[in-house]
Amino acid sequence: MVKNYIEVAPIYQSLYLLWKPGSEEVIMETEAKVKEPEALCENVGKGDAELSETVYQTDNAGESSSTQEPAVSNGDDSDEGKEMVDLKIIWNKNKYDLKIPLDGTGAKLKERIHSLTGLPPAMQKVMYKGLLPEDKTLREIKVTNGAKIMVVGSTINDVLAVNTPKEVIQQEVKAEENKKEPLCRQKQHRKVLDKGKPDDIMPSLKGTKERLPTVPLAGMYNKSGGKVRLTFKLEQDQLWIGTKERTEKIPMGSIKHVVTEPIEGHEDYHMMAFQLGPTEASQYWIYWVPIQFVDAIKDTVLGKWQYF
């Protein structure tokens, strides 16, 4: 029996050595002392568990901190460090404030207008001292801080809702023009052209294209041979045709077509008609329009946005 105690564990070996026959008190005391290390082991185990739990929580906290999403900036990082210009966009009687880089192009401005108004760039007619070129920067066309940018255009649904689109009318008018002799040879125009070039007409610049001037185009003739001037009121989207007697204020949206043709012998000047109704009878003729402004007038009145 003594051999078994010694082989099983050193604790029981100590127990045997302390035990004497008839001494149960010593055995109970020794058993109580043996249990104390067990309690200590339990406490140590509990401490390790608490330490592990603390480490786990710390690791989780670190992981949470490391995976926390960075703050989102409301600014446009791509515009940082660029010289900006504040613009007032006016479309459909609504006004929008827009800040854009001064070195941005007209095409970029159209994209920003699209984001503000929902009007696609192809449907926009953007005007600042005439039709805004898409390939030039705002700095190049001298856009200033606080400038008003006029936008004219309709959504696709609005255009499709029109019973007689301008594009169809223009094609019909063009087909009719091709069947006729040159306009400047027709009798109704010759009586005006035979008067000769007006003395106070604006000089022409052949081979160049310019934006609309900031002053009215004056010194031209109308069909009756009287002096006429053109004023483009972009903020009202109107064309003012002024004579000595009165001034006609015509909404640009009501002009169906623009007819132009060089004057024979004076190809640096054009004769031009604004068609105000569905037929040629509604054409308002103007003579001796300087060639450098012809395209700007057509684009401003009709707008490139129509051709889609």
Image: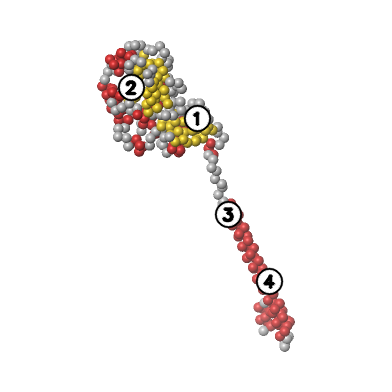
| Residue position marked by numbered label 2 in the rendering | 284
Q: Nearer the viewer, residue 31 or 12?
A: 31
As helix, strand or loop, the secondary structure at mark 1 comes to: strand
For the question of whether residue 288 can be seen, the reply is no
Closer mark to the observer between disc 1 and disc 3: 1
Amino acid type, mark 1: Ala
In space, the residues marked 3 and 2 are separated at their CA atoms by 75 Å
Q: Residue at x 27, y 18 (%)?
A: 181
Marks 4 and 2, the one that precedes in the sequence: 4
**Which residue is nearer to you in this view: 231 or 293?**
231
Left or right for 135, reference 84: left
Q: Which quarter of the image is occupied by the N terminus?
A: bottom right
Instruction: Please report whichever mark, 1 or 4, sits nearer to the chain's N-terminal start.
Output: 4
Location of mark 4 (residue):
40
Which badge, 1 or 3, comes first in the chain's sequence? 3
Residue found 60% across the figure and 54% down from its top: 62
The residue sitting at the front extreme is 245
Mark 4 or mark 2, whichever is nearer to me: 2
Residue type at mark 3 is Ser
Mark 2, mark 1: which one is toward the viewer? 2
Q: Residues within 10 Å of mark 4 (few under 14, many from 20)?
A: few
Indicate the amino acid at tag 4: Leu
- Give how far apart the Cα atoms at labels 4 and 3 are: 36 Å
- Label at residue 147: 1
Disc marking residue 64: 3
Query: From the viewer's perspective, is 77 left or right of 180?
Result: right
Q: Nearer the viewer, residue 100 or 107?
A: 100
